[in-house]
Image: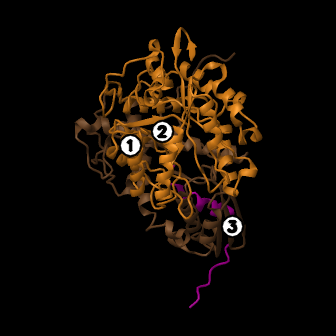
Chain colours: A orange, B brown
Amino acid sequence: MYRKDGESYYVVDSHIALWDARPENQRNVHGKQFIDCFYDYHRNLSPESETWGYEEYLYQGGERLMRDVFVDGIVDHAIFQPARLAEFYHRGFGQTEEAFALAQAHPDKLTYNHYWDPRDGENGLDQLRANAERMQLKGVKLYTADWHGESRGWKLTDPMAYRYFELCRELGIRNVHVHKGPTIRPLDRDAFDVADVDHAATDFTDLNFVVEHCGLPRLEDFCWIATQEPNVYAGLAVAMPFIHTRPRYFAQIMGELTYWLGEDRILFSSDYALWTPKWLVERFVDFQIPEDMTEYAPLTTALKKKVLGLNAARLYDLPVPAELQLPDADETATGPREPAAADLASV
Amino acid sequence: MTAVLPDLAVTEAEVRAALGTVVDPELDEPITDVGFVRSVSVEGRAVEVHLRLPTSFCAPNFAWLMVSDAHGAVSAVPGVESVVVELDDHHDSDLINRGMAAGLGYRGTFGHEAEDSLDELRATFQRKAHTAAMERAVTALLRTDPAVDVAALTLGDLPAGERTTDALLRRRATLGLPVHDAAPVLVHDDGTRPAPAQAELVLRRARSVRISVDGNAHFCRGLLTTRYPGSEADQAPRPEDRPLLPLTVSKGTHP
């Protein structure tokens, strides 16, 4: 719970990881390239006071994760969104057993989502069934840019992926977090294309599709799809830290998301351990759209409360104290949400 | 018959000028402006160029386009006889550099991962570059005259010689859209004019494209300087960041 100026915010960090990128776990040069890429994101976008050394960035472990994520009692609940990256790391990047054990030890604070990959075929379906039972899965994290043998990427519309979505539906796994990385296959097309989300969301209207880092670097394509699909959500992983380095860009991202999706379908996350949640929550509560950006309405306190936790709490049935709950906005299900604020004269 | 070429020395400046015609399709900026050219060396008629990108995991199809375009541009410099263009520190560096050196082409380099060509990918980002330029031109005009009827605007209404106007005309020419004064400014990708009632939505959507392109350009530039300390010296200011309106110079008294 975060309190500021007489307001209380129930906070859900909807995207955290417990990773191990230490050299002994790196399978090849790509393991090092991958964590170096994350570390450059971290160094480039963090305030100096929140920047870590390279060694500590490689692995945090459960104890430190609990301290970092839940420091000062700001974050009420956090959700693991692991990436497998088995081609880059001997024991994978996300540490399944360690994270799952941590979630079992702190069920009030942590939810463990697992991943699946359609290229695992029939065996993967059996494994998903077993994982769902053992881990009581409410959500899954899908990384379409993961490498797998000869294949360097997949699409949500692959026929086998649809078998997995059907199984998710059967098992009651309602939340599908989609991480669009640079997918190499098919190489002919845009590696960050989000069009497959459109098709999957249309065909599985009873599943919620949370597109992580709100489709960045394809914010525009994401917004256009999400405005038409009521079951598509924006995850703010990676977008959040722009609040520090590029606040005007962050304002535009929030302005666009609010315009196209509305306030009920945006989810806060730190993307821990890329960044830590405390400073992001504090900055977000204090944040406002600059006055000269008159094409965007100011961010209301209600919107901030929803983005910081209430929207994710609804997807994951988390127990939010009654006095902190808010009703859904009375908004259109599809199409732009606040056309009256579409001031053409402003940039 | 053998043509005898005059013994012209190839200069680094000529090579860099040629590289200045190579554009990062996603950012719509020359690779020389964003700092992607790591080094240029010229020995006689042999040229070696090294490119670098903001991360090891930048999309390899864009990487291929830039390496391949750079190779083509440098090869066309008069006097150049041999060209090596290499991409450094990328997860597909070995694959791309080998394919380029052997002249395997896109499909020959990427094998089963390549289906046909990267033409459609390139066209997609040419369309986005046009959309962003269209939004910049319209918005610049709206800043000076908020009452402008956006749906009715034609190219002749845009201020001649302005950067935003010239940039739009260049992108239109690339797409084969008309560039005469009577042509509508606000258009769909296929060049057709939206119905007046749709104009606002079309401009709003164009704005999201422009925000996306600008945001990515800043992030990529920043990441490059984090990854390669000192590379900021190789980056030129992004034209889109320059003020759209002349700044009023204060005539206040100096202390």
Q: Quadrant of the N terminus of chain A?
A: top right
Residue density around tag 3, few if under 14, some if 14–19, many if 20 or more, within 10 Å: some
Q: Amino acid at mark 1?
A: Arg
Residue A18 visible? The answer is no
Disc 3 target residue: B48
Which residue shows up at 53% across the image and 8% down it?
A: A6
Which residue shows up at 42% across the image and 32% down it?
A: A257
Residue B184: say if magenta: no
Q: What is the x, y in percent for residue A192? A: 48, 50
* Above or below, comparing residue A203 to residue A331 in the picture: below
Disc 1 target residue: A169
Which residue shows up at 46% across the image and 38% down it?
A: B211
**Real-space Cα distance between discs 2 and 1?**
11 Å
> Which range is magenta?
B1-26
Q: Quadrant of the C terminus of chain A?
A: top left
Both on one chain, marks 2 and 3? no
Left or right side of A23 for B24: left
Q: What is the x, y in percent for residue A51? A: 71, 33
Disc 2 target residue: A139
Q: Earlier in the sequence, mark 2 or mark 1?
A: 2
Kindly identify which chain the residue marked by label 2 belongs to: A
Q: SS class of the residue under badge 2?
A: strand
**Real-space Cα distance between discs 2 and 3?**
50 Å
